[in-house]
Amino acid sequence: MKVLISGASVAGPALGFFLHRDGHEVTVVERARSLRDSGYAVDFRGAAFEVLEEMGILEEVRAHATGMRGTDLVDADGKRTGELPAETFAGELEVPKRELTRILHAHTADAARYVFDDSINHMEQDARGVRVGFERGEPDTFDLVIGADGIYSVVRRLVFGPHSAVTRPLGLSGVGFSTANHLGLDHRGVLQQLPGRAVYLFSSADSHRMSVSLSFASDSAELDLLGRVEQERIVRDRMADAGWLVPRLLEDMAAASDFYFSSACQIELDRWSEGRVALVGDAGYCAAPTSGMGTSQALIGARTLARRLAEADGDHTKAFAAYEQELRPYVTRNQEIGREGALRFGA
């Protein structure tokens, strides 16, 4: 079949790998001008390792492990009060997201046609296929369209309805960026939790740099859609009276070239497909970063969808139903974990 995948982060390239292996013609369209190099580190748990091994990239991914050794808990003044084991944040294996994205693209660049700096803006489907319009490219027709384009999925919005109807905010937003390693951290993290706020710092690959996460209670995932200037203003406002290292971190934030803002939210849908269109990963069933399962879920979802399509021998209706039936219990549990995680951070 001729398949269009929207999104070139994790779920999209992984699905493209399996679909190409099964003989399908795959195109991946991505709004960004090139591979994204921002975002937090990502971790892998459970069956995700089977997917990486099946793709032949497990050892290559392992080579980029952050090697975190644990996280120190500190009070409002930065005084150590305890410790969390490495797997709390890093799972069984943690790597920088940019490295995972690069590896996935490198192993699928010859298997799928990648189109960057473009996005779907129209879809119309019938019994013969899906007619797709693009912001830049010429319209084309595909047998299937798969949305792997994240929480604010264009595919989902066009086919399933507005974001607000399916997004469940978990009451937590935050900013991530890197800066100088002010604390001299060595493959360790530091976590400060205050009422309605959290500061998480860690350093792994580059001893001179550390990653920063400033989180705070919020009431809307729509903060993600604001511009950087407004997002920075909100972060400063919510963290204004925090002491310890926070004032210095807020200054660093303004100069950061890898600024990344994200709100913890979940996607809740009664179904993950409509006709010849289906969703995979965060686009269909985001469990929130607080679950620690987003990357694993994306990989497992991609492999499950591809396998069900292969088993159904071209019957997408049968394949989509089997895909959802198999995966939904797993997603439901991960979303429970995500909600519990948000509560632990004071949301």
Image: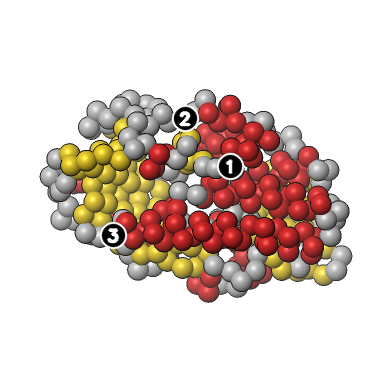
- The spot of residue 170 in percent (x, y) is 40, 64
- Name the quadrant containing residue 219: bottom left
Q: Nearer the viewer, residue 94 or 140?
A: 94
Mark 2 or mark 3, earlier in chain? 2
Give the position of the C terminus as an image quadrant: bottom left
Disc 1 and disc 3 in contact, CB within 8 angstroms:
no
- The spot of residue 111 in percent (x, y) is 75, 38
- The spot of residue 185 in percent (x, y) is 27, 30
Mark 1 or mark 3, earlier in chain? 1
Disc 2 and disc 1 in contact, CB within 8 angstroms:
no
Q: What residue is shown at x 35% (from left), y 54% (from top)?
A: 174
- Name the quadrant containing residue 13: top right
Look at discs 2 and 1 and give the one toward the viewer: 1
Q: Is residue 291 left or right of residue 279?
A: left
Mark 1 residue crowding within 10 angstroms, few (<14) / some (14–19) / many (20+): many
How far separated are the C-alphas under marks 2 and 3? Answer: 29 Å
Q: Disc 1 on helix, strand or loop?
A: helix
Mark 3 residue crowding within 10 angstroms, few (<14) / some (14–19) / many (20+): some
Mark 2 residue crowding within 10 angstroms, few (<14) / some (14–19) / many (20+): some
Residue type indicated by callout 2: Ala
Residue 48 is labelled as 1
Give the residue at mark 3.
Answer: 346
How far separated are the C-alphas under marks 1 and 3? Answer: 29 Å
How far separated are the C-alphas under marks 2 and 1? Answer: 15 Å
Q: Disc 2 on helix, strand or loop?
A: loop
Residue type indicated by callout 1: Ala
**308 in relation to 74, above or below:** below
Q: What residue is shown at x 41% (from left), y 29% (from top)?
A: 67
Residue 157 is labelled as none
Give the residue at mark 2.
Answer: 65
**143 in relation to 109, above or below:** below
- The spot of residue 305 in percent (x, y) is 71, 53
